[in-house]
Amino acid sequence: MVQPAAQPPNQTPVPLPVAAPAASRYWLLAALVLAVAVFLRLFDIGRPSLWMDELWSIEVSMGHGSVHALLPVGAIQEKQIELTNLAGAAPWWKIWSNMIDVAHPPLYHVVLRWWMDLWGTGPVSARSLSAVFSLLALGIFLDICRLLHGSVVALFAVAVMGLSIAQLDFAQEARSYPMLIFLCLAAADSLLRIERRGPTWPRLALLALALAGAELTHYFAAPAIGVLGIYAMIRLRGRDLRRTLGALVAAAVIILVAWGPWFYRQIHTFPSLAPDFLIDHSPHHLRDTLGRLSLLPGQFFLGEIFMRVYPAVGIAVGTFAVLLWLAACFSRRPDALLWSLWLIGIVGSMVLVDVLRHAVFLYYLRYTILASPALYALVARFSWPWTQRLKHWPVAAVLVVLATLVVVRIHQGVPSKGNWRQFAQIVDATVPPDALVVVYHDDPLVAPGLWYLAMRYYLPDSHRPWLLLRGPADAELLRQLQRRDSLWLISPDPPSVLQNLLPGWQRQRTQPTAVGTIYPMTRTAHP
């Protein structure tokens, strides 16, 4: 028998090329998964009303800060103030120095402004930026999972993330979280390529820029940056480690130079970086924190709203996912290291903040959604060890559940978090064109100017005079109001709270809306 010729001792073996049909099938399936993701993220994207935080995003992107929170209170205003109109916007570079009354860094608002300069400020235009970043994050996630786990697992992982109700919800909101996920995954992808193929200058530059961009998008990128630093110290050695840590230092320098002075001013002028709605006053805070933590995995798949509608499904899927993650941890395979660190670092930091500060960050999915890709990947990489034919049944089961709920979501429509469009339509249909609109709200966390912001966005041609109140009208204001025979009071508060607000005025019939009640008021007597 002829023996094969021996290789020269110093010759590196050449890896076998991937078969062309297999490679083409992989990319075809990847394109199909991404096409479904595109459809789901764009379908009906403009139908639900913009909610409070989305209106705020558009307002801040106009370059004047949170103007609605600083509007004059207690004085009748005849002139309209443009809050979301590009015609009255400041230049985009003013956003950086005008993050007034905002507890976020400015990069997302700058990018959103560029996007709206191209496509306008309508709901579809504002939200489509998040859809684009969500799709870009899916592409990066596909590459990360292919590098770590291979092509099959990568397809399963991207399918899970593409069908996740939580990801769909955030992809259809004009908020910074899809951009944050994209930039953090881009940094992770750069680090993995440095680990496997060496620290070239383009890879190091991409790592530094992605990390800096993530932190300038949202402050809660910090745990992910720490996780990537820990992963680098575990997996890299020598020159590769030194250069990678140098990229992390470069990212810190970029952040400090680009945002440091304005960040110093922001933390000294913003009322509270942990406002009252994020504080837990319950005496059973630790127990409640653990309860919120137990619901988090289900929310990563079903989102906040569907988790409330189908809690049993969410708890079952979340528990299943956690069990698969624990199985990955016990397997001690290195391809699970990044995702385990990612999940523990991001969620663990929120648990720590909640416990130490009696906060409820875990209650709001937006503060932990960055950790969700780790759970998707850990679910996708698990294979059933006892049968080769059905080894991927766990992730297939998750996909079936998610696909079913996506169909339900399409059929039922996406519920709004606050129907400000309906509110504005009722105002326009109910309130006469020249009538005085009075908005009252005494909650220190929600300015009455928010109702004015919604009216300016949805009723840009309205010229109704307006008045904002945080408490009962004073004597001078009441004298001015006596010149009018009627006014229209808008408030989310019950009538019992409003009875002493305007002495000498009587409420007529009420007109409820999704975000408050409209009370026609008539003058009855001098106070």
Image (spheres, grey):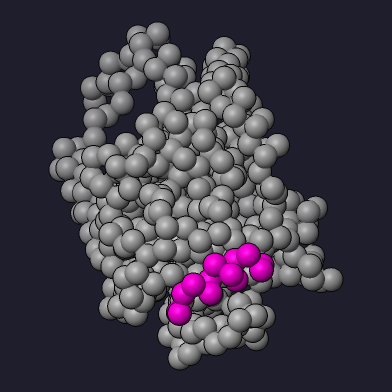
Residue 17 higher or lower than 492, as above or below: above
Name the side, left or right, on which 456 lies relative to 187: left
Q: Is residue 478 magenta?
A: yes
Give the image location of residue 258, x and y in percent: 53, 23
State the quadrant of the C terminus. bottom right
Name the side, left or right, on which 359 lies relative to 1: right
Residue in front for this viewpoint, 167 or 244? 167
Residue in front for this viewpoint, 425 or 481? 481
Residue in front for this viewpoint, 6 or 146? 146
Q: Residue at x 28, y 59 (%)?
A: 461
Q: Residue at x 31, y 62 (%)?
A: 462
Answer whether residue 142 is visible to the viewer in this image: no
Residue 211 higher or lower than 376, as above or below: above
State the quadrant of the N terminus. top left
**Outermost residue toward the right?**
283
Residue 129 higher or lower than 42, as above or below: above
Q: Residue at x 57, y 12 (%)?
A: 239
Residue in front for this viewpoint, 391 or 339? 339
Magenta residue span? 474-486
Give the image location of residue 120, x and y in percent: 25, 47
Please tell me in which quadrant of the rendered image residue 416 appears: bottom left
